[in-house]
Image: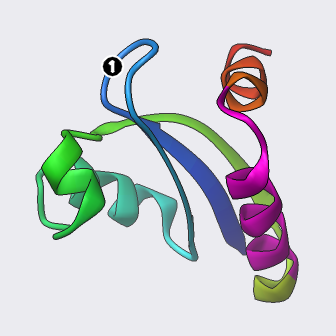
Amino acid sequence: MYFVYLMASQRNGTLYCGVTNDLLRRAYEHREGLVEGFTERHGVKRLVWFEPHDSIEHAIQREKRIKNYPRQWKVNLIEA
């Protein structure tokens, strides 16, 4: 099982989209600042949305589509 997920720094804050095969571990890594880079620099620590996929190919394809959507579309997805 693979997951596409969105993390946020706070309500209406910075968003990050990613893919993982272990959602609990990955959310923990973000929350504890163990992931260097964008999420650490911007304080992105809250898991706000996720979606399961059976294959890594579908998960990556979905992640790429989500990254290209406007911010408001992502906010609507989270709040749905």
Type of secondary structure dominating the magenta stretch: helix
65 sits to left or right of 46: right
In this rendering, the answer to whether 64 lies above or below 43 is: below
- Quadrant in which the N terminus is drawn: bottom right
Q: In the picture, residue 38 is in which quadrant?
A: bottom left
74 sits to left or right of 8: right
44 sits to left or right of 75: left
Q: Which residue is mark 1?
A: 10
Q: In the picture, residue 18 is in which quadrant?
A: bottom right
Instruction: Please tell me which residue is depicted at 76% across the width and 18% down the height of the picture.
Output: 76
- Quadrant in which the C terminus is drawn: top right
Q: Position of residue 50 (x, y in %)?
A: 65, 45
In this rendering, the answer to whether 62 lies above or below 67 is: below
Question: Does residue 61 show up magenta in the picture?
Answer: yes
Q: Position of residue 39 (x, y in %)?
A: 27, 53
Residues shaded magenta: 58-71
